[in-house]
Image: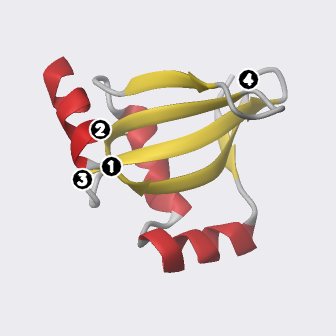
Amino acid sequence: MAIRFEWDESKNKSNRAKHGIWFEEAQSVFDDAFGRLFVEDSSDEERFILVGMSLHSGIIVVVHCYRDEDTVIRIISARKATKRERIFYEKRI
């Protein structure tokens, strides 16, 4: 079964304006074999945080959730990693 990505298009535009990253670019992080995945504890919905290397934006952080029996990844936000997050990621590779 193939994984699909989805997002709210208005959120995609506001994310680009705020963080400089389109959700289309954020998809590429899911191909990073060295990506670090965490569960976010602060939400009612089960959300995940993925820190990884994107194709064009360097190391970024993608908040997302899984839907439809894990066949859909819904991207919630994406931003450039902080210095601390970059160091954490780089220790893995």
| Quarter of the image with the N terminus in it | top right
The residue shown at (63%, 40%) is 64
Residue 70: give its label. Answer: 4
Image marks 3 and 1: residues in contact by CB distance under 8 Å: yes
- Sort mark 2 into few (<14), some (14-19) or many (20+) by Cα contacts within 10 Å: some
In-image side of 50 versus 48 (left or right)? left
Residue 58: give its label. Answer: 3
Type of amino acid at the residue the image marks with label 3? Gly
The residue where tag 1 is placed is 81
The residue where tag 2 is placed is 85
Mark 1 to mark 4: distance in Å?
25 Å
For the question of whether residue 52 can be seen, the reply is: yes
Mark 2 to mark 3: distance in Å?
12 Å
Coordinates of residue 87 in the picture (x, y in percent): 18, 34
Type of amino acid at the residue the image marks with label 2? Glu
Mark 2 to mark 4: distance in Å?
26 Å
Disc 3 or 1, which lies upstream in sequence? 3
Disc 2 or 3, which lies upstream in sequence? 3
Type of amino acid at the residue the image marks with label 4? Asp
In front: 2, or 77?
Answer: 77
